[in-house]
Image (cartoon, coloured by chain):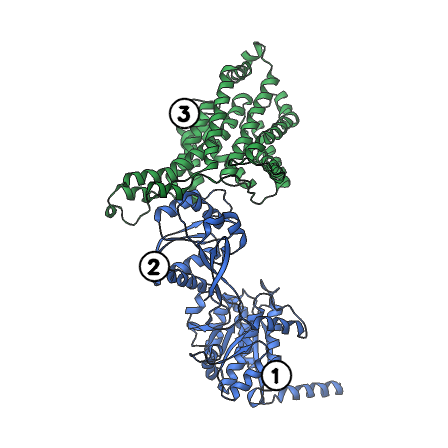
Chain colours: A blue, B green
Amino acid sequence: MKKLFLAASTLALTAGVVSAEDVKLGTLLGITGPIESISPNMFTAADMAIKEVNDSGKAANGWVFQNVRADSTCIDAAAASAAAERLVTVEGVKGIIGGDCSGVTRAVLTNVAMPNGIVMISPSATSPALSTDPDDGLFFRTVPSDAREGQVMADVLEARGVKSIALTYSNSDYGKGLAEAIANAFTAKGGTITINASHDDGKADYSAEVGALASAGGDVLVVAGYIDQGGKGIIQAAVDTGAFTTFGLPGGMYGDSLVEAIGPALNGSFGQHAASTSEGYSAYLDLAKAFEPSFDGSTNFAATSYDAAALIMLAMQAANSTDPKVYKDKVIEIANGPADGSGTKIKAGELGKALELIAAGTAIDYDGATGVTLIDGGDASGTFAEDEIKDGKWEIVGYR
Amino acid sequence: MDFLNALVAFSNFILIPGLAYGSQLALGALGVTLIFGVLRFSNFAHGDTMAFGTAFVILFTWWFQSMGITGGPLPTALLALPFGIAVTIAMVLGTDRVVYRFYRRQRAKPIILVIVSAGVMFVMNGLVRMIIGTSEKNFTDGSRFLLDPKTFRDATGLAEPLAIKTTQAVSVVVAVVCVALLFWFLQKTRTGKSMRAYSDNEDLALLSGINPDRVVMVTWMIAGALACIAGTLYGLDKSFRVFVYFGLLLPIFAAAIVGGLGSPLGAIVGGYVIAFSELIVTSAWRKILGYLAPPDWLGPGLYQALSTDYKVAVSFVILIVVLLFRPQGIFGGK
């Protein structure tokens, strides 16, 4: 009994005497729920960034970061809000890496983060709604919004002087969302959408659909569909009837099987697909392999989790404060560097160097594992490769 | 010039696809109507018989291609077709021997045979999936176009392209040849006449010494051959997927019923009626009208009666209307 008391009191002592330098961060991801299979590596990747900073010993004021995990459940907004509330009020975290799924992230942002003034950086919430939700400048994400590809497609179309497009999309959540994003972005640039029609996947014949698209006309037919499904059928029927000669091909249509099936008629068509160009990505994969416990860094959203954790800590360093109200203004500055691009690029595995540079007053441009660049609303821009089909082959003609 | 453009657009998007699709439906409906006329039941397994025949044509096509035998500008599948037909005929005769003959001997009611054919349909559907798989199969080769849209545009200087795919031309030609052969067979040969006699009045035919087993066998052979040809033409022109052939059953039955079940001529007319109705109702007429009417008359609409998603509904509506108001069909079947 006595021993137990002793042990308990020592524990209480060590726990109670949290030195002024200890900084707690919360990681709010789905330990349970639909993404429970990918969340373990996301947690570990965030831990890896925190351990890297602690091991370097370069953090200002002798800060030692600690990670507190909590379960967002991915789908239950009430449970996620309660978990976040506990992180903030009981654990006293200074920033949250999370949430994961878009629905719970929006709930936590409005119910917990904004009332308490806590910074949230999500590695995986992709809903376009999060770009426009009011967030008091507290919300960021290291993953691009679903709307981003629509924006990029519109940029590509504009750059090629396309004035009007016919748009068809796979009758699925993906297709619908993407088509909406493309339509909004392209119209905002002054382009014309002659028709915005869905097509069902798995049909034998798409000539009727193409007939309607052809009737509406347009310089280019943009096909927001799947490469091995209706998207291919639509293009085949359009080529067969001579209805369109140039096609706009978003990421879902990127792949060699398309050019093999359609042949030379596709030459001159163009599009874009999400592509990681960051040098830091391979460095990050090596780190993940060498980390204890070793994990596969290429699983979904693990790299963005590393970047989310790193961004919070670097922003604190830059603000010389762990107060979210102060360091929130530094997040975009750290991620993008000065506008003239003079910031020193920081790859994954260089967090110690970054802390040193910040302390010395040198501007940095954090690229991390995924080439982080934040745009308006605190969203990652993501990197898209612009493709063009030349001589029956996909060629990357640039990055956006 | 505008009128020519309108005409070309009409041909490109409605006339040519309609003729090809109508030919494929007509051949399918002919098989259904023959079975109904002679064996007196609606064969629900017909769509899957088409898939079965096409699957074997595809296998033979691949085999020929691997040996370097091709049809030149024509699809290799045409060479493989006789072999596919042979397998299909063997299969339908086998089904008749194992399944249908039992019920025929029992003098089962037509409704029982219909249910039996639904059972055969499911078995055959599974069989085809096991043989060739569920994914889309592509077996079209040879030259793609008889008339290339770009060539046409360059040659005529019209704004509208006109394309005729080789497979569309093949569909129409093969259908015409098959129909001609079938009518010659039914009208002129002894076996054909006995089939018609058996179909018109079974008892009288039996009294005049017609062998019923032989009539049934020939009917199955013709229906199997037609199913295999129709399926192959459809697969060449569009694409092959088992599930799609299952769905073809509806327009095929609609075609047979519109024409009048049991009437071969009706099945052909019905095939084109269904094909053109589907295309006319679901196509957007804006482009064609745009050439005919002054531009400011039209406004922004697409002039599309129904979205293309509702293509199947067109056959349904026609089927219901015909059954309500003229159940015997255009040519007065049964």
Gap in Å between the C-alphas at discs 1 and 2?
Answer: 51 Å
Task: State if disc 3 and disc 1 touch (CB < 8 Å).
Answer: no
Q: Look at the image and tell me in which quarter the N terminus of chain B lies.
A: top left
- The location of residue B262, given as percent across then percent down, is 49, 23
Mark 3: amino acid: Ile
Label 2: element kind: loop
Query: In the rendered image, which quarter is residue B208 located in?
Result: top right
Q: Is residue A188 above or below residue B162?
A: below
Crowdedness near tag 1: few (<14), some (14–19) or many (≥20) residues, C-alpha within 10 Å: some
Mark 3 highlights which residue?
A: B330
- The location of residue A239, given as percent across then percent down, is 44, 46
Crowdedness near tag 2: few (<14), some (14–19) or many (≥20) residues, C-alpha within 10 Å: some
Q: Is residue B223 above or below residue B68?
A: above
Label 1 or label 2, whichever comes before in sequence order: 1
Label 1: element kind: helix
> Of circles 3 and 2, which is in front?
2
How many circles with numbers are drawn on the protein? Answer: 3
Looking at the image, residue A346 sits to the left or right of residue B99; the answer is: left
Q: What numbered label is drawn on residue A117?
A: none
Mark 2: amino acid: Gly
Query: In the rendered image, which quarter is residue B243 located in?
Result: top right
Crowdedness near tag 3: few (<14), some (14–19) or many (≥20) residues, C-alpha within 10 Å: some
Q: What numbered label is drawn on residue A54?
A: 1
Gap in Å between the C-alphas at discs 1 and 3?
Answer: 86 Å
Q: Is residue A348 above or below residue A301?
A: below
Label 3: element kind: loop
Q: What numbered label is drawn on residue A191?
A: 2
Q: Chain of mark 2?
A: A
Tell me if residue B267 can be seen: yes
Q: Chain of mark 1?
A: A
Task: State if disc 2 and disc 3 touch (CB < 8 Å).
Answer: no
- The location of residue A82, given as percent across then percent down, is 54, 72
